[in-house]
Image: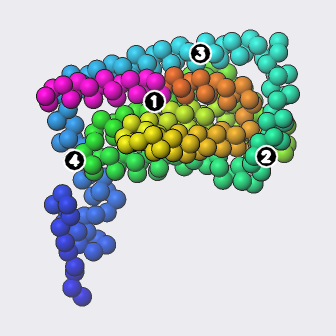
Amino acid sequence: MKQVSSTGVSGTRVSGIGGRWTSWGLIKTLWTKFWRDAHQVPSLAWRRWAETLLIGLGLGATLVAGITRYAQTAETAWLKAWDERWLPIAAESAPLSFAKSITWESPGNLLIALPLVLVFIGIMVWRSKPLIAATTAAAYVLQFALVWVGWGLWHRQRPQLIADGIAASSLHSFPSGHTVIVVAVYGFMAYLWLRAASNWLERATVLGVYGVFAFRIITARLVLGAHWPSDVVAGLILGLFWLVVVITAFNRAEGMTRRART
């Protein structure tokens, strides 16, 4: 049997199923391309990018620690009663059924979001967009640290009010990690699309699509009884803060790169 081979865009040789276009070969090719393109970005721009993220990470950790401590204090005073009152109301009034919520909450899951994020990063690397690729990776990875600050300070139990807690995991409840991912990670992707939009109709479409997407994922967590409403509120605050940090880091680095090339 003859072995069919060809040459890819970057000069990588493909030879049937056993060729270099295996998963590992693709990773090596993308990493090489990213490394080469990243060197076209001024080192000072990367430094400012990293500094902005690290400062934001520190401020974000302080923010989530403060919110968590406040929520712990308010738990017995009024927060628990408020959550117990509003969770059933939110679940019953949401435009999603329990079954549909299982599907809709999936993109906010850490493991399910990972391949989506990796594909987006791979596309950006292939298109020679190292800053976008690196910023997307940082947005996804570093949000873990912020969420874990809250989880580490408070092992809040998940709700048992909806379907006897069948959809509530054993992980910590405060803040909502799904909400942080939807707002910060998918929010950054939406920001890039919004910025690239050529007219008001496309911008309105971006905002509408992202708004519905985010709303349904976050609402699904309440319909399933996987989070208390205050978990989601905390996730929204943290997610918005981290989104601002990520966008600021990206814009600073991109601006310095643009100025260096002119």
Is residue 151 something one can see in this rendering?
Answer: no
Q: Which residue is under mark 1?
A: 142
User: Disc 2 or 4, which lies upstream in sequence?
Assistant: 4
Give how far apart the Cα atoms at labels 1 and 4 are.
23 Å
Nearest to N terminus: mark 1 or mark 4 = 4
Q: Is the magenta stretch mostly helix, strand or loop?
A: helix
Percent of width and height locating residue 248: 38, 23
In the rendered structure, which disc, 2 or 3, sits on the residue that comes first in sequence? 3
- Kindly state the secondary structure of the residue where label 3 is placed: helix
Picture quadrant of residue 261: top left
The label shown at residue 166 is: 2
The quadrant in which the N terminus is found is bottom left
Q: Label 4 crowding class (10 Å Cα cut-off): few <14, some 14-19, many 20+?
A: some
Q: In which quarter of the image is the C terminus?
A: top left
Badge 1: how crowded within 10 Å, few (<14), some, or many (20+)? Answer: some
Q: What colour scheme does the image use? A: rainbow
From the image, tell me which residue sits under label 4.
33
Tell me how far mark 2 sits from mark 3, CA to CA: 29 Å
- In whole angstroms, how far apart are the C-alphas of marks 1 and 2? 29 Å
Observer-nearest of 73 and 103: 103
Q: Is mark 2 on a helix, strand or loop?
A: loop
Residues at circles 2 and 3 in contact by the CB criterion of under 8 Å: no
Q: Mark 3 points at which residue?
A: 65
Circles 1 and 3, Cβ within 8 Å, touching? The answer is: no
Residue at left 66%, top 44%?
Answer: 216
Sequence-earlier tag: 1 or 3: 3
Q: Does residue 2 lie above or below 209 as drawn? A: below
Q: Distance between the residues labelled 1 and 3?
A: 16 Å
Q: What element carries label 4?
A: helix
Q: What residue type is labelled 4?
A: Lys
SS at mark 1 in the image:
helix
Under mark 3, the amino acid is: Ala
